[in-house]
Amino acid sequence: MRLYVDADACPRAIKEILYRAVVRVKVPLIMVSNLNLQVPDASNISGINVPGGPDAADDKIAELVEAGDLVVTADIPLADRVVSKGAVALDPRGDFYTEETIKHRLAVRNLMDQLRSQGANTGGPATFNLKDRQAFANQLDKFFAKGRANGDFL
């Protein structure tokens, strides 16, 4: 089991939670980014810098992810690709993307993109806040607890 992060747009607070959590549970963490990214000096934390456009990091994660891995991303098309490979995707606000919900979320995202391209002002996501950070930390803890219970890692 590995944990991948779509790191370019991931909030700093979420990165800090992830760094502490993976050191505690000893799960490999791979930060994937188009930008130069500094990661803590820990044996199970690494970074992959990918050249290219905005989807290069998404493509790299989709290429590397395997069933049972966890991917942290707010990118709904990437989450769709991850879930279709049998991996788990978690939004930085603490929402899991599932087989039951991902197609609906992708359709809504595509509709909003279409509306924006036609000039509609659809607004943006709400400001990331302490409640989002806590929801993410809680879901991550639940994921790791379930993994330990299943013997996925120690």
Image: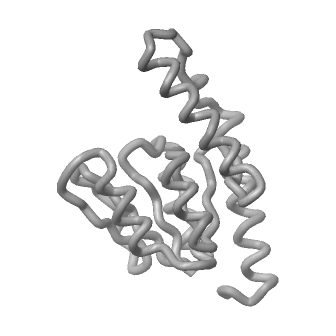
Q: Percent x, y for residue 18?
A: 54, 59
Give the quadrant of residue 49.
bottom left
Q: Percent x, y for residue 23?
A: 53, 72
Q: Nearer the viewer, residue 117 or 142?
A: 117
Q: Nearer the viewer, residue 105 or 33?
A: 105
Give the quadrant of residue 44.
bottom left
Q: Percent x, y for residue 105?
A: 66, 41
> Which residue occupies 47% across, 66% down?
4
Quadrant in the picture for the C terminus:
bottom right
Q: Percent x, y for residue 51?
A: 18, 56
- Left or right: residue 20 compared with residue 105: left
* Residue sitting farthest toward the left: 51
> Which residue occupies 60% across, 66% down?
84
> Which residue occupies 64% across, 66% down?
88
Q: Nearer the viewer, residue 81 or 64?
A: 81
Q: Is residue 7 above or below residue 42?
A: above
Give the quadrant of residue 41.
bottom left
- Left or right: residue 12 compared with residue 46: right
Q: What sort of colour scheme is used for the picture?
A: one colour
Q: Is residue 153 above or below residue 60?
A: below
Quadrant in the picture for the N terminus:
bottom right
- Left or right: residue 53 compared with residue 55: left
Q: Count numbered badges in the picture.
A: 0
> Which residue occupies 41% across, 65% down?
61
